Image (cartoon, grey):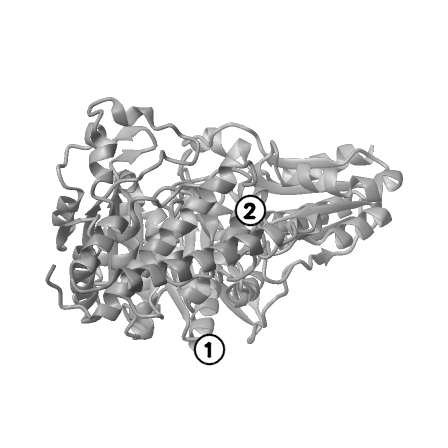
Amino acid sequence: METKYSKKHLLSLYEVMYRMRRFEEEVFEFYKKGMMPGLAHLYLGQEAVATGVCAALNEDDYIGSTHRGHGHLVARGADLGRMMAEILGKETGYSKGKGGSMHIMAMDKGILGANGIVGGEIPIATGAAYSVKYRGTEQVAVSFFGDSATNEGTFHESINMAAAWNLPIIYVIENNLYGISVDIRDVTNTANLADRALGYGIPGVVVDGMDVLAVQKAAEEAVERARSGNGPTLIECKTYRWQGHHVGDPAVYRERKDSNEKASWMERCPVTCFRDKLLSIKITEKEVAKIEESVEAAVRAAVQFAEESPYPDPAEAYTDLFSDM
Amino acid sequence: MREILYRDAICEALDEEMERDERVLLLGEDVAFIGGNFKTSVGLFEKYGDLRVKDTPISEAGFVGMGTGMALTGLRPVIELMFSDFMLVAADQIINNAAKITYMSGGQVTVPMVIRTPIGAGRSSAAQHSQSMQAFAAHFPGMKVVVPSTAQEAKGLLKTAIRDDNPVLFFEHKMEYSNKYMIDDVVEPIPFGKANIVRQGTDVTVVATSSQVMKSVKAAEILEKDGISAEVIDLRTIVPMDRETIIQSVKKTGRLLVVDEAYERCGIGAEIGADVMDDVFYYLEAPIARIGTPNVSLPFSPALEFPLIPTVEKTVDKVKKMMK
């Protein structure tokens, strides 16, 4: 594998992806044990997307996230303990248990909010980009969303305005092929969703969403374009989710056309394939294992923190509606 | 004091707030070059420029959502929706997003955004351009809801709205835009949640919103000739609601009529009536009454439309029945 990136950077990419992987596996465990209220939409399988895109960003850039948002938060360095506590509905969670898995917000990490409405955060991230232009800072905004959000009106409305006004934003489609059970190819007559960029007069880029370095490269080009005042880019990352739409969805619909579909995507696992790549370029097993151990310790600590945290007092439900009442 | 058109009072509030705070910007359909469909932002585009007074495409969900993104990142956007009926086009961004983000974030962030939008029937604008959406807005948690009456009130309350750190829905009555009012030379912000007793009375309390405040004052003048003393309260804000002022008034008068132009069903009258009942029940001399728009879509023909709109006469008649 040839790459322009330093060994340190490559290891940090692996560290972030492995952290996402292990975090989500623990979320799944909580669900299976019946300890998690409600549901969660796991990021398992899509790790290269958030990791590659966020590797191209600065700390003060903005992120619009989705119902499948845990990966975006981990990529931005959000606190795993506060994330897990939120997912369990504990008072120590990012939103004191009011948001849950779908609405983890970490404003200190530039996360404008994860959004439970498909396409709901696209205009919000676009407004953040307008704000950047208005304030004249060097920031950019990234709006992550799934393939199905490209059929929401907010997708069209937002990209149209960002293109018309040259806003510093990168739109990232995480195309995992399915909107709950519906195959995007059955409801959309576009081979590549990135082709829709043509309709807005902006560049559209298709990238292998299982390859973190390919994602980072595409994101860097788009970020450079945005920061230099040349407007938005639409990036489509072709990826796949290991689990169903949410925990507990057996995802039988994926066997309908191709019984081998899931297995063939899993062979291209973004985490394990990248690990193999690292070992092929003079990075030792010991170096990788050291990272994995530190991630294990961090995830264990997060799990323990969340388990031991108390639930919020019922009176907490009546606070935070307004800033002043 | 000086004379001013209602729409110019709105424009002055916008101008003065933009002047004092560079984080304030205005977005909406036709707000820039032509100064707004109802001429409420004339001259602001020339004064503040294209980035700060922005004509948007016809993408209500898109530009309301953008307002939320601006508000989360240090700006204080004022969004104009050309008709309050268009709130429904942007309903997800208003109700599921702007109004809920502070709560969903556990108080990490605030959304200082004002959505200004006209309400009211009377222009033969038919079913999709004549509705009064304040009761609908007040149903959902997380938004402050303002229903100003006169030009002075509109200017003072709009200044407060722009300085508020939360989403504020600001409903201007479209039949007022061309009306002339006297206004103070300097209008200070008017606090939310403090109703205004615009006319003292002893026999009946009339709680009114928006244009119905002026109509209720006229009704009170007519009733006075028949020896009925009506107290008129300008509610000013539905959220937050000044229950105390209403309750104290009803304890004095023994009668309560609520007049609001939104649909009567599940409306402001029903809400206030039920809300204050525990506190006023034993003081009542007559059942609590309400006047709103009947639950039919607003028709085009003036022959059909005008009979549906709450009027001075309807208020006079209702109060007379309550006095029997």
Which x, y percent locates residue B60? 35, 48
Q: Residues within 10 Å of mark 1 (few under 14, many from 20)?
A: few
Residue type highlighted by circle 1: Arg
Mark yes or no: residue B79 visible.
Answer: no
| Residue A227 figure quarter | bottom left
Foreground residue among A175 and A310: A310
In the displayed structure, B315 sits above or below A133; it is above
Q: Which residue is mark 2?
A: A88
Foreground residue among A280 and A2: A280
Q: Which residue is mark 1?
A: B20
Foreground residue among B33 and A81: A81
Q: Secondary structure at mark 1?
A: helix
Q: Chain of mark 2?
A: A
Foreground residue among B184 and A208: A208
In the rendering, which numbered label is found on residue B142? none
Q: Quadrant of the N terminus of chain A?
A: bottom left
Q: Chain of mark 1?
A: B
| Residue B51 figure quarter | bottom left
Residue type highlighted by circle 2: Leu
Discs 2, 1 touching: Cβ within 8 Å: no
Which x, y percent locates residue A228? 18, 71
Q: On the rendered structure, is A302 left or right of A141?
A: right
Which x, y percent locates residue A195? 13, 45
